[in-house]
Image (cartoon, rainbow, N blue to C red):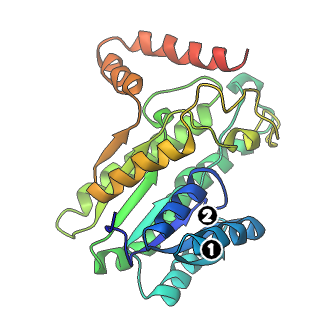
Amino acid sequence: MHAMQGKTVVITGASAGIGEALAVVLAGRGANLVLAARNEEALQRVKARCEAAGGRAVVVPTDVGDAEACRLLVERAVEAFGGIDVLVNNAGVTMDARVDEVKDLSLFDRLMRINYLGAVYCTHHALPHLKARRGLVVAVSSLTGKTGVPNRSGYAASKHAMHGFFDSLRIELRGTGVDVTVVCPGFVATHIRDNALGADGQPVRRSKHDESAGNMDVDTCVAITLKAMERREREVVMTTKARIAQFLKLVAPGVVDRIAAKAIQDRQR
């Protein structure tokens, strides 16, 4: 419970969902929060929740797809709290369209820029400060980063890229005292799919599925993530079904393809 006391934690995508919930719990454990996202109004609301929980927080409006904005985020965090102990790369956007339906190819650029390059930019600028405190890098990925999923091709690609980057970085950081934790949730009951990019490259605005039905709740996801952070675990695959699927992918990949296809079909009914 005291592992995060006095630690400075930078969280991207902190204005809602997993990022918001994680920030509030960490604030209750005495952490200093640096809250980053594009929506300043939403960030101010999260800041108020963090302070009510007993923590300290600063708001830094940030578009993680902009490398300079990521540099300024890190600079502001160091100015506010003197350094960085944990960086949580949580910002992300998804999609909901088949490849053959896509009308605006720029949506693939946006997915890679936010989900993958945003994590690269923030991590690169934060590394000197993380090394100084023997800190922790957290990448909030997805089960989609480990296996392909229909209608999520660009999202899956960005999360596969994230996995490759952080697995490589982990090896490079051996001996520095900095650890890398990759967290792989499945479907979590957040509003991320309300803002999924459709075939025209625009947000769909409303998920086609009831996100409260059959999904992991945010609090459970955050509890698993926190435990992984405190133990500085290498990687966390959040559900038993998903862990079984990773084994099946090695011995019967076609079965996993059918499972993924059915999962999406069931969500669209």
Q: Amino acid at mark 2?
A: Val
106 relative to 26 in the view: left or right: right
In what element is the residue under mark 2?
Answer: loop
Q: Residue at x 53, y 52 (%)?
A: 116
* Numbered badge on residue 69: 1
* Numbered badge on residue 64: 2
The answer to whether mark 1 and mark 2 are in CB contact below 8 A is: yes
> Which badge, 1 or 2, is on the more N-terminal residue?
2
Where is 251 relative to 34, above or below?
Answer: above
107 relative to 237 in the view: left or right: right
Q: Residue at x 53, y 55 (%)?
A: 90
Where is 195 relative to 26, above or below?
Answer: above
Question: Considering the image in quadrants, where does the N terminus appear?
Answer: bottom left
Residue 43 location (% of width, % of height): 69, 68
Residue 132 location (% of width, % of height): 29, 81
Residue 68 location (% of width, % of height): 60, 75
Q: Residue at x 57, y 18 (%)?
A: 263
Quadrant hosting residue 31: bottom left
